[in-house]
Image (cartoon, rainbow, N blue to C red):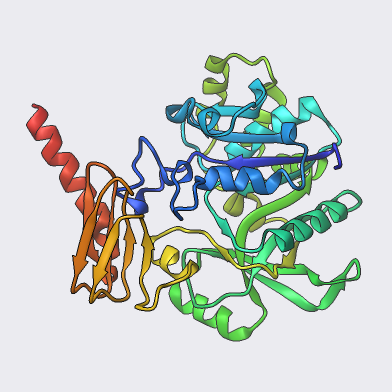
Amino acid sequence: MDKNNYCIIMAGGTGSRFWPMSTVEHPKQFIDIFGNGESLLQSTFRRFEQVCPRENIIIVTNNIYRGLAEQQIGGLRDYQVIYEPMRRNTAPCVAYAAAIIRRLNPQANIIVSPSDHAIFDNDEFTRTILESLRVVQTHDWIITLGIKPLNPNTKYGYIQYNENNVLEGNNKLHEVITYTEKPPYDMAVQFLNSGDFLWNAGIFIWSLPTLEKAYRRYLPDVAAILDTVDLDTPYEDVEKIYSTCQPISADYGIMEKADNVHVIEADFRWSDVETWQSLYESVEKDENRNVVVGDNVFTYDVKNCIINLPSSKTVVLQGLEDYIVAGDEETVLVCKRSEEHRVFKFESDIEVRKNKQEK
């Protein structure tokens, strides 16, 4: 395994759309959403152990999750989990981890990945990542993984690529023409109909020198992290540096502007597992088109439902169709799938009532 291969796993999100299972205190990347015995973070870490030395995988999470990552991934070295003092979106997060990697290995080739996505063909994923790493060793390119779009989803970035421009003998590797982060619906429909757009999977591969060059050119205030943070920087100093960074994603800050972005069209099935609906679309259904996670769930005349409940609970459901039934040891949500967007309101109302009761 190439000792120059490094991976940054971003694990600081709140995962609030998966309430009540996912909360601010214990978000979805630390939860076994699929009921397979692994949290999303654990699955992601295991996947990247196939392409990087274990000690070259760095997890970046928020200070409020101090200890959670270390509890879930055993045997890590001190530098392998770093804590952001505040949320500043993904660009400062990546710069922070890259600054640590820079001190460890200036020749590093780096994968940047979310912690909470699902990949359904690990062998093909590994092949694609290794091919991308091979390319960035000799090219000043940013490579992103593209997914063939299934619908005009407005929550994803869209990558327009040059179909006739096949690179490095790989008919899946193309030069990017345009990169548009989260377009409005009408534009997403046009992208889908054109046939030469891919969804951005949010996984970037680049060499450390290419990463540094991009930050210095497009995000100079964030690039300051690269020059001022090392393995021994006191946390209070990191906090001061972070407070001066604009809160911006790597997508908006770099990918939309850079002229050296290339895309590999992925041949594996992928989901960002962003909503209950995306979970439903991602996994196998039973004979009644239900997704059931939980060992003690009994269903009668239940169809097209997402059911995700702790195995410690015995639950009987009858007569439901197109519902979400999800919960933890304390709270259960029963909500129409078509009304999933109201989850934020439900959670907010409960917090307001709790606060009133505490007063």
Percent position of residue 85, x then y? 49, 26
Q: Nearer the viewer, residue 253 or 192?
A: 192
Task: Tell me what residue is drawn at x 52 percent, y 64 percent.
Answer: 156
Percent position of residue 211, x then y? 75, 43
Percent position of residue 30, x then y? 46, 41
Q: Is residue 161 left or right of residue 351?
A: right
- Position above or below: 162 against 211: below
Q: Is residue 260 visible?
A: no
Q: Is residue 131 left or right of residue 345?
A: right
Q: Is residue 33 visible?
A: yes
- Position above or below: 348 against 197: above
Q: Nearer the viewer, residue 153 or 330?
A: 330
Task: Tell me what residue is drawn at x 48 percent, y 71 percent.
Answer: 153
Q: Is residue 2 left or right of residue 284?
A: right
- Position above or below: 287 against 154: below
* Quarter that holds the C terminus: top left
The furthest residue to the bottom: 193
Task: Tell me what residue is drawn at x 51 percent, y 76 percent.
Answer: 188
Quarter of the rendering containing residue 176:
bottom right
Percent position of residue 253, x then y? 61, 49
* Quarter that holds the N terminus: top right
Q: Is residue 55 left or right of residue 357?
A: right
